[in-house]
Every structure is written in structure tokens, then in C-alpha cells.
Amino acid sequence: DTGVSQDPRHKITKRGQNVTFRCDPISEHNRLYWYRQTLGQGPEFLTYFQNEAQLEKSRLLSDRFSAERPKGSFSTLEIQRTEQGDSAMYLCASSRTGDGYTFGSGTRLTVV
Amino acid sequence: DQQVKQNSPSLSVQEGRISILNCDYTNSMFDYFLWYKKYPAEGPTFLISISSIKDKNEDGRFTVFLNKSAKHLSLHIVPSQPGDSAVYFCAARKTSGSRLTFGEGTQLTVNP
């Protein structure tokens, strides 16, 4: 098991385009989280899945953001009509309980 | 509303000395606290945690102290090593939920 895997590592997109990120959690972990981190700030919670059920969404997750976790395995985070303010590091994490997440290396999004 | 705050953006110490990183929180519902370490271009890595029923937890060179009455926790690293140079994030979790709330981070630099 190689840990939490995120793809792509970097994404540059033009404003107004749609982007999708993928996260593959540690296989035995039933919980999966998405966080966003901007420069000089700590990670901010976006959403959380237990198996395939999306149990919590942050107010940060506007209507342009959607996350899925079909079959309770990998997850995707889609951002529609990207804005410059969406530029950030998007982090995925997984756990078996609520303690001690394992984070992936993140996807760095730059909207130009 | 920054519920978890790390007031020192940076800290510089000499190799072999003690590093003390501080964190304050405002929400009395937080019952579990964690420290993460982050190297550039990597996701945060879990370091050590403490439950609100304890006031100290130790793991090798790392000790976390919790002062509930002051809503303050600290991470002590003794002795500090150059490889400890990284950004350290304090995080907290509420009793009822699984999301983590992070502080802004402290950049620790350990000089040889």
C-alpha cells in the first residue's frame, strides 16, 4: 500500500474551465476527506465521505464544487467554471476512524 | 472566525535545543488535538495527538501538552534536529464530528 494517492499533482487551467481531481485512499480506510490549503493558511475542510455517503459539506463548497465517491473507493472533486480564487492546494486524506488522517501530496491548482 | 490559532508564523532554533510550538483554540467543544508536520510539496504528516482527558502525551522526542483551562496546547521537540525543519500545524476536532480545524501553521527552522 503506497498511501493516499492524488492525481494530478499540478493543474493549470484557464478561468471558466472545469477541472476534476482524483483521490485514491488507503484501501482499508472507509473515511475520505477533502481539504483546501491556500498560501500561509492551514488546510480548510471541504467535505467528508464515509464509504460512499457524503456526510458533511463545508460552506466553502459552493455550487460550483462537487465531490463523489462511487462504490466507496476513490473520490473525485470537480470544480466548474473555475475562478482565480480557486487557486490552491487541494488535499485528500483518509482514515479508518476520525483520528490521525493520512494525507496525500495534494493537487496544486492554478487558475490563470 | 479562526477557532485554532498559531500566533507565531516562524520559529528558529539551534540544533540540539528545545523547540516549543504553541497553539490556542477558542471552541470548548474541541476534545481531540493533533499536530501535523508538512514539508514543501508534500501533504501534512501526522505527528502526535492528545485527548482532552489528558494533559500530556509523549512520543520519543515529541511531547504535546494540553492546558484546557487556558485553551492552549504546545508541542515540544527535544532535541531539535535539522530534519525537523518544516511547517507544523495544530489541529482540533469536536466531540460530535470528524472534521479537523487547523491553525495557520508555524515554520520551524532548526539550524545546524
Image (cartoon, coloured by chain):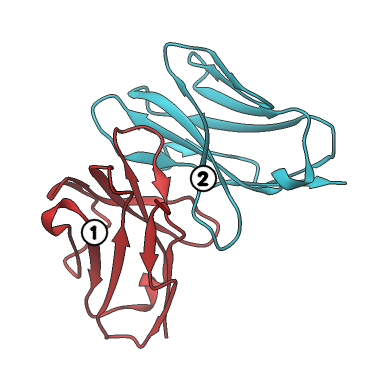
- In the image, what residue occupies the spot 38% across and 28% down? B27
- In the image, what residue occupies the spot 85% across and 39% down? B15
Image coords of residue A92 (percent x, y): 35, 55
Give the Cα separation between the discs numbered 2 and 1. 20 Å
Nearer to the camera, B71 or A74:
A74
Q: Secondary structure at mark 2?
A: strand
Q: Residues within 10 Å of mark 1 (few under 14, many from 20)?
A: many
Nearer to the camera, B28 or A19:
A19
The shade of chain A is: red
Q: Secondary structure at mark 1?
A: loop
Nearer to the camera, B101 or A107:
A107
Residue at mark 2: chain: B
Query: Is residue B97 left or right of A7 when viewed as pictured?
Result: left
Query: Is residue A20 left or right of B27 when viewed as pictured?
Result: left
Q: Is residue B58 above or below residue A31?
A: above
Image coords of residue B100 (percent x, y): 36, 39
Write down the residue under mark 1.
Answer: A74
Q: Amino acid at mark 2?
A: Thr
Residue at mark 1: chain: A
Write down the residue under mark 2.
Answer: B45
Residue A47 — which label?
Answer: none
Confirm whether circles 2 and 1 share one chain: no
Q: Amino acid at mark 1?
A: Phe
Image coords of residue B23 (percent x, y): 56, 32
Image coords of residue A56 (percent x, y): 18, 45
- In the image, what residue occupies the spot 64% across and 47% down? B9
